[in-house]
Image (cartoon, rainbow, N blue to C red):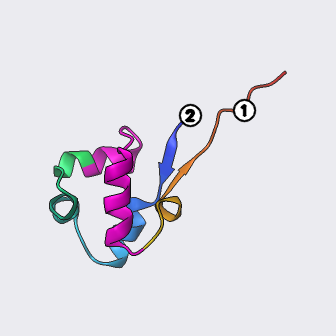
Amino acid sequence: MPLNNCLKEYRAKINVNQTEMGMMVGVSRQTISQIERGDYSPSVTLALKIAKIFNASVEDIFSYEEDQVDG
């Protein structure tokens, strides 16, 4: 049940690196890296902060896909 995202693409559009992005939303560069890799799911508050930076909705940046269950 991964939380997919296109944060890296959004960052590239405004020419901001991971360190700068982290400073903008109050987290470390490592946290931004983990979010982009899908290793960390941000809190609702953090997702909202990130979306606000890009004047986008949370759904524009993050998407949730449920695992398909056969049967």
Total marks shown come to: 2
Which of the 4 image quarters holds residue 49? Answer: bottom left
Q: Where is residue 7 drawn, in percent x and y? A: 39, 60
Is residue 42 toward the left or the right of residue 17 in the image? Answer: right
Q: Quadrant of the N terminus?
A: top right
Q: Amino acid at mark 1?
A: Gln
Name the residue: 24% across, 71% down. Answer: 16
Name the residue tied to disc 2: 1
Instruction: Tell me the element at label 2.
Output: loop
Which of the 4 image quarters holds residue 22? Answer: bottom left
37 is within the stretch colored magenta: yes
Q: Where is residue 61 drawn, in percent x and y? A: 47, 61
**Residue in the foreground of this view, choosing between 10 and 51:** 51
Q: Residues within 10 Å of mark 2 (few under 14, many from 20)?
A: few
Name the residue: 15% across, 61% down. Answer: 23
50 is within the stretch colored magenta: yes
Which of the 4 image quarters holds residue 50? Answer: bottom left
Closer to the chain start, of discs 1 and 2, is 2
Q: Where is residue 9 drawn, in percent x and y? A: 41, 67
Which residue is the extreme one toward the front?
45
Q: Quadrant of the C terminus?
A: top right
**Residue in the foreground of this view, choosing between 1 and 56:** 56
Please give the label number shown on residue 68.
Answer: 1
Q: Which residues are magenta?
A: 32-55
Name the residue: 37% across, 54% down. Answer: 47
Is residue 2 toward the left or the right of residue 10 in the image? Answer: right
